[in-house]
Image: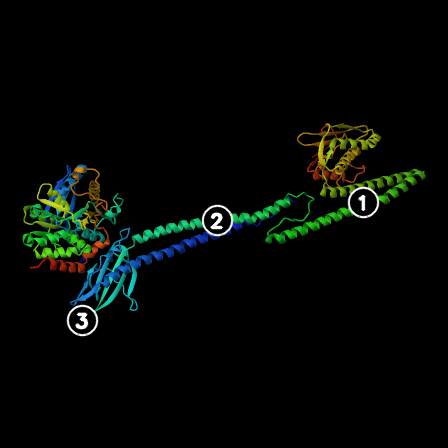
Amino acid sequence: MRYFYLLATVIFGLLASPIMAVDWEDQRVFSGASPSRVLRILSSTDTAFFEPIIESYLQDDPTVTVEYFVSSTSDLDTIFRQTPKAFDVVISSAMDLQFKLTNDGYAMKVANLPHPDWAQWQQSLFAFTTEPAAIVINKNAFSAQPIPQSRQDLILALRARPDFFRERIGTYDVRKSGVGYLFATQDARLSETYWRLMEVMGSLQARLYCCSGDMIDDLESGKIAVAYNVLGSYAAARAKTSKTLEIILPSDFPTTMMRTALISRAAQNPEKAKNFLRHLLTIQAGGAYENALTLPSLMSRQDPNGQSTIDLTPALMTYLDDLKRATFIQEWSNAIIQN
Amino acid sequence: MSSVLPLSGSLRNQLAVTLIGGAAILAVLLFFVVRAYAAQVAQQGQDSILVASAASILDAAVIRNGQIEIDFPYSAFSILNTPEDDRVFYAIHRDGTLLSGYQNLPQPHIQPQDTKTIVTERFRDETLRLIRISRVLVGENLRTEVFVTVAQTQDALSVTLNTISRTVALFGLGFFVLSALLSFWATSKTIDQLTRLTTSITRRGPQDLTPVDKPVPVEMVPLVTSLNTLMGRLDQSLKRSEDFIAEAAHRVRTPLATVRAYAEATLQRVSREENRQALRSMVHAIDESSRAAGQLLDHAMITFRADHIDLQEIDLVEQVREMVRNLSPIADMRDVTFDLKTDSDVSIAGDPILLQNAMRNIIDNALKYAPNDSVISITVQTGETISITFQDQGPGFPATQIGDLTKRFARGSNANGIIGSGLGLTIAQEVATAHGGTLELSNKPEGGACVTFTF
């Protein structure tokens, strides 16, 4: 009975493949020149950012077809926990979820990678970007007003023109977004200002988003005027083409996360996955393939501005605790949803 | 002296092996004891951090509106961060049901008298150090027990233990090497005392039987005292026997002279040939006895002087000339001539009386065995060593006995009828030894005995 169950799981895992069942945000196949193997990457990063990385990898190794699946950070965690066999590489901006995956034994050890100690955990989880959470504004909304430089400034600005900002503020729905939850918990851990900001945003019926991309879309179109805790890298990419966006790194305290990658312990193609990981880390370390560097590179822990990065330590598991999470979501909901 | 003593091992080796073996055992013991202690301390370190972590979770547990809330601090897990990235597992239970954390994490039983339990368990293919603590929460109409389990892998601990082991091993090795060096030093220092005593006794002349008077360690005092007593007794008994011989010879000589005088006188008076013959034999025997007594006296004197040799600058050639002069009358009686070949002026440090005695005995011997009308050549040679060679044209030494002739009372097999005591060459030999030289006997290929006295 037990074996039957196991067999059924395996068959389900491989054939009925949940990959088909999932409603992906994006799904792309990159084929090398003479593909013989498939490397499946499960990622929370928009395809556009990874395209150059994958393309440059395929130049080096044309025997691989890369299937790139994009989902939100929390869905990604759920999908991967259900079918760890279906993916070779997992990339996510939700450091805490990635950390817990590693702690729970889903990641494969890759020994002797020349990667700094602070940017890896258990030789299994590798950080490859340093990305701040940013306040992004539509400049048109602040044409006559000073641009806020900190959370405190933002609170004052919002309070000054409540009617203007009503329903025109956006932030992550921490119930749906893993990275949003990470940013929120880290903010809350560091300062009470976060809760006051949430109170203000709640009173102005803030819009809640699943992803940075959507938030930036609405910001660009003018549907919202301010977005809080947006992934700086996404906003920066969009700001290149859109003159209306301005990215503010809060001067009181920045929250900076590292995008991380791990190789599934049940990977079908571990060798190719390791090669890809090596390639990714090389690019992000600022070495070869400068053209492929579309994401912020991995910076030293403490940059001159005193930006401190969220550490890869067991403490990341604190807010993933069911009780803690329930308490936090409750408090957060109370603050931001005030109908 | 030259016989080989049976050995019962080496004192130095025994001492060194005991000390080094002891040091090795101590070093190994040190390694295990210190490592075990360090491991215990390191484990206590991990345990106390786990306890702190679990306690900070449990402390945060409160009952609010009938619900349990545990808003534990960030530090609860951040203190569990290790350089080796140890994995962390935890579980929070309420009366046996999981509230949050890892399912299936082992839940060791907490003894009723304890508030916590610490065990090492296997979980998910890892060895975990696991701590479990509990607390009773009391709310309105509610009494419930909350259990917190926190577990951590032991990678950092084993790295620490390896480092400790390596350090302690190095420490133990260092201890051993130092102890070994110390053992060698102590051993050689101890044996040195014995070696010094041995050397000081070995270096002595054959006649030196004075007691050892250099300071010796307490432990060696009985040995040295016995040795000194033994040597004292030996010395005394040697002296006594020499004294006895000298005294005896002296006492014998005077009556012998009287007897000889009477015999000579009687020989003048008797005319019967058989009586005269008997008297002549008597005189001959008396001569032999008196000569032996003289030589015994000489020998005793030489033994005494050799013990307290009084070296002075003397002219060897002059000594030899004087000797030849003194003995010429006797040689003339037998038509034997001396052929003296010398360099001028050969001066040596020596005892003139001993040297004259030795030379007289050697030349005496030569005269006794030399045929009538022959030459005894005496050559004084200088060069690397100074030596005097005495050579006669007699029958030479019996080849088979040549090595033994310098022993006391040894006489050649061809000495029949010739007066002699067997002490002449012994005396010459002893004089040579007292001067740090040698006496060498040989036969010339053209015939005749050759005695070489080398300084």
Q: In front: mark 2 or mark 1? A: 2
Q: Which residue is mark 3?
A: B140
Disc 2: CA contacts within 10 A as few (<14), some (14-19) or many (>=20): many
Residue tagged 2 = B180
- Label number found at residue B249: 1
State how many labels appear: 3
Compared with B68, B400 (above or below) is above
Looking at the image, tell me whether mark 3 or mark 1 is earlier in sequence order: 3
Q: Dot 1: what SS?
A: helix
For image coordinates 62% across by 52% down, the residue present is B223
Task: Name the mark on residue A128.
Answer: none
Residue B392 image point, x, y percent? 76, 30
Q: CA–CA distance between discs 3 and 2?
A: 74 Å
Q: Amino acid at mark 3?
A: Glu
Locate the N terminus of chain B by quadrant.
Answer: top right
Distance from Cα at disc 2 to Cα at disc 1: 64 Å
Q: Residues within 10 Å of mark 3 (few under 14, many from 20)?
A: few
Circle 1: residue type: Ala
